[in-house]
Amino acid sequence: MVATVAIVGRPNVGKSTLFNRLVGRKLALVDDRPGVTRDRREGEARLGPLSFNVVDTAGLEEADAESLTGRMRAQTEAAVAGADLVLFVVDVRSGITPADRQFADLVRKSGKPVVLLANKAEGRSGTEASYEAFTLGLGDPVPFSAEHGEGISDLFDALAAHLAMPEEDEADEEDEAARSIRIAIVGRPNAGKSTLINRMVGEERLLTGPEAGITRDSISLDWEWRGRPIKLFDTAGLRKRARIEDKLEKLSVADGLRAVRFAEVVVVLLDATIPFEKQDLTIVDLVEREGRAVVIGLNKWDLVADQPGLLKTLREEADQMLAQVRGVGVVPLSGLAGQGIDRLMEAVIAAHEVWNRRISTAQLNRWLGEATANHPPPAVSGRRIKIRYMTQVKSRPPHFAVFGNQLAALPTAYSRYLVNGLREAFSLPGTPIRLSFRQGDNPYAEHGKPTGRIYKRR
């Protein structure tokens, strides 16, 4: 059983910087202003031979329970309750504050073992400044610098006193059947992404509320659906680029785009009361260009009248406006009411299978012969373009290589005809399809100047 370590402390003491150092990657957003972190972010940390799960939390602040700050504090308290060890971080530059003392009492009352980390203790002067942390009554402070990595051996010793070392022969390999499907939930601000994920995992794991733009970090959560392991990624709302001026929002959007690239299936969540806004179409196009399987979720479906008629209309509109992912799954649901989650996951699994599908070369060329006979490629300068054969070069998403002559002159409309034909003939709805056109060398070209070319089209 892997231990869980929660990093807690008041705002801007360096918790996210410490988190990033422990996981070895810049996963958590870091900024000089306080209160950047809102949701709990989990990661797999490794410090020497120690392996453990680490949780970054929002800064502890006194606030009304119903306010956003109060809800952030509740998330931090939940992280402490679920941890095996608490890393209590203080800032030695600003000294021990009344808030530090108050929250030290809260951590002490939790009954969890605590390691007191005196952060920003660079150099000898910082080590001396850390002595003030003794007054918190949480044991010996560990002088540390999360930004520069000073004191890492002392931190290791403090953690090793509480965490078990892994067995030498412990296996850390997983087979393909046990591998999690990575699913990112994206959409415009206030589409209900965090509410949906909370309903899926069965707990208030992510901050939600009427305020738009609550989510900042892309938070990953492990979940299981019908015995299948799933890794969910909640992301910040994606607005039009021209409207994004705040530096922190830019970082949040960049973090969300990284989650899309890391995912296998992306659920684009729409507000069913105002579906298919221009930004929704832009988001779907972005996901398709990244080559990820797509599912469209119509959230807040419980607020819609004439549901059967509207659903039929929206599915038709999806095929018209999103021709690049024609046949994409469109699933009505309500994250708040918990409706349609099983239908959404069935669509996700189906999209994932299509995204991984491989088609034999024999099948492809039988289809290609019929397709080119029914609609031959056009002629260029009096010579007809010849398509000789095709094969699938990879999946995830399906990618096909087409071989022939003069393929550089093949019109975009004809390549679209081939993509649509492949989608229909081999049941590839909703997934991006890639075509590479490869033409051979000209035997009459000057020696030493090969003319072979590869042309890629979506």
Image (cartoon, rainbow, N blue to C red):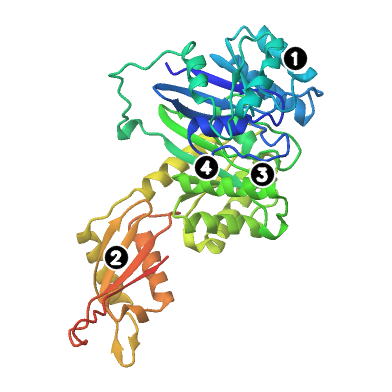
* Residues at marks 4 and 3, CA–CA distance in whole angstroms: 14 Å
Going by the numbered disc 2, the residue's amino acid type is Ala
Task: Estimate how packed mark 3 is, as few (under 14), some (14 to 19) or many (20 or more) residues with alpha carbons within 10 Å.
Answer: many
Q: Which residue is mark 1?
A: 101
Going from N to C along the chain, the mark reached first, 1 or 3, is: 1
Under tag 3, what secondary structure?
Answer: loop
Going from N to C along the chain, the mark reached first, 2 or 1, is: 1
Under tag 2, what secondary structure?
Answer: strand
Drawn side of residue 404 relative to residue 205, left or right:
left
* Residues at marks 3 and 2, CA–CA distance in whole angstroms: 39 Å
Going from N to C along the chain, the mark reached first, 4 or 2, is: 4
Going from N to C along the chain, the mark reached first, 4 or 3, is: 4
Q: Which residue is mark 2?
A: 401
Q: Position of residue 334 (x, y in %)?
A: 63, 37
Drawn side of residue 290 relative to residue 339, left or right:
left
Viewer-nearest residue: 418 or 391: 391
Residue shown at 72% from the left, 23% from the top: 60
Q: Position of residue 434 (x, y in %)?
A: 38, 62
List the single residue furthest toward the right.
Answer: 64
